[in-house]
Image (cartoon, rainbow, N blue to C red):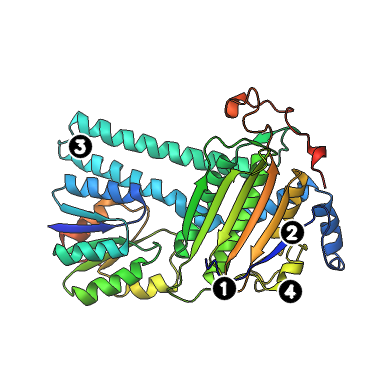
Amino acid sequence: MTVIVVDDEGIVRDTLAMVLSNNGFDVRTAGSGQEGLQILAQTPAEFLITDFLMPNMNGAELLAEATRLHPGVKVILISGQVDCNDSMAKSARHAYATLRKPFDFRELMDLLAGPPTA
Amino acid sequence: MDAGTPRAHTAATPGTFPGAAPPGAERDWTSALQAGDSRFIHAARLAALGELATGIAHEMNQPLAAMQMIVTSMLIDLDGGELPPERAREWLGTVNEQIGRMAWMIGHLRSFASSETSEPLACAALSEAVENALGLLRAQMRSHGVRVEVEVEEGLPEVRGDVRRFEQVLVNLLSNARDAVGTLPAGAPRTVRVRARAGAEGNLVVLEVADTGPGIAAEVRERMFEPFFTTKGAGKGTGLGLSIVHRIVADCGGRISVETGPGAGTTFRIELPAAQPAGAEGAEGADGVEPGRGPGRQGVEP
């Protein structure tokens, strides 16, 4: 299963890619929303996992654009605990799921394995 | 920034504030500030830290998120009986690095919040102040979609003063720059540039904070170093940021000037006396600089 990870914070992006790869996922990484869209255009992915707080194109904007261009992709929004504002709450309704950093990796694995329980 | 747009230049004279003194209770604070009262400057530093708290919490969440992912993944692997020692070693190495990152941040926060005064002849590396200030502001800059460019000249001489105070100067100027570019319409380039370089005269170090914001109006420019003068909305600014910058720079025997113009962005330029002139005998980097040598503060005191 192909998963695209988008986060401008290198350590989170690389760690997420590392542990997902270790669990058998085909992982592509991007440091920005624009780069994430480019990868998505070339590589059909089932999931796109994106940080919410990013410059230029934030997670909400990426979610809107990714699902508009590729309706089949499931977007998981990850936020820091401090950026859950109105914009985040609104976009969360259109996301496949949302997680807050720091999050339990098992929870993410459950999301990737099947439909959300909530 | 548009080089063709005329920019006005304002230089503040250290030790005096143009315009009328603020009335009433603010007068005591103003006196304390003008006297360089370290308790007042410390209180303002704590207030700045409070304003940055959410951004700092966000920064701390990054290593925490990485560490939790690794530890949980290792536990899953252990439960499944599939955790090769090589992988465990590599992943624990990453955890160790992130613990170091968090320890640095916590140590730095404690240092920034500390009320301890430095040695009278303390020297500071501006590169350290720049790194520390950006460490506090990085998340906020990201959330405001601001691109930050940093250029710190190699081998820059140290300047006389407390590194925490220069950090406070940078936090205040960068916060203003962030707010300035935040007023730009969507799609406009939002860039803040921090530059530290040797001055043309050799015994000066120049610190610049420039933004691509809308510039500062003439009537604001005349009063912006006054304590409690603010153009930010109620509850959004204390009006102390630039007056504290001014006070700290004056205390270090420095000079601050501003270049700005409508639509031409703003550059705050601070000139500080080097603790020891570049190329002076015995100047062999940070460890080679002896406090007490080089130009004395009185040589450039306002």
- Identify the amino acid type marked 1: Gly
In the image, is residue B16 above or below residue B224?
above
Q: In this view, does B89 lie to the left or right of B145?
A: left
For marks 4 and 3, give the CA distance: 67 Å
Mark nearer the N terminus (4 vs 3): 3
Could you say whether the residue bearing mark 1 is in a helix, strand or loop? loop
Position of residue B192 measured from the top left corner of the image (x, y, whole percent): 52, 59
Q: Nearer the viewer, residue B229 or B200?
A: B200
Q: Write down the residue under mark 2.
A: B11
Which chain is home to disc 3? B
The image shows residue B80 at horizontal and vertical percentages of: 15, 40
Marks 3/1: CA distance? 59 Å
Real-space Cα separation, disc 1 to disc 4, in angstroms: 16 Å
How crowded pointer 4 is (Cα within 10 Å; few <14, some 14-19, many 20+) is rated as: few
Report whether B239 appears left or right of A15.
Answer: right
Cα–Cα gap, marks 2 and 1: 20 Å
Per the rendering, the mark at residue B78 is 3
As helix, strand or loop, the secondary structure at mark 4 comes to: helix
Residue that carries the numbered disc 4 in the rendered image: B219
Q: Which residue: 50% across, 38% down?
A: B104
Q: Single out the mark in the foreground, 2 or 3.
A: 2
- Earlier residue among tags 2 and 1: 2
Residue nearest the observer in this picture, A89 or B294: B294
Where residue B98 sits, quadrant-wise, is top left
Disc 1 packing (10 Å; few <14; some 14–19; many ≥20): some
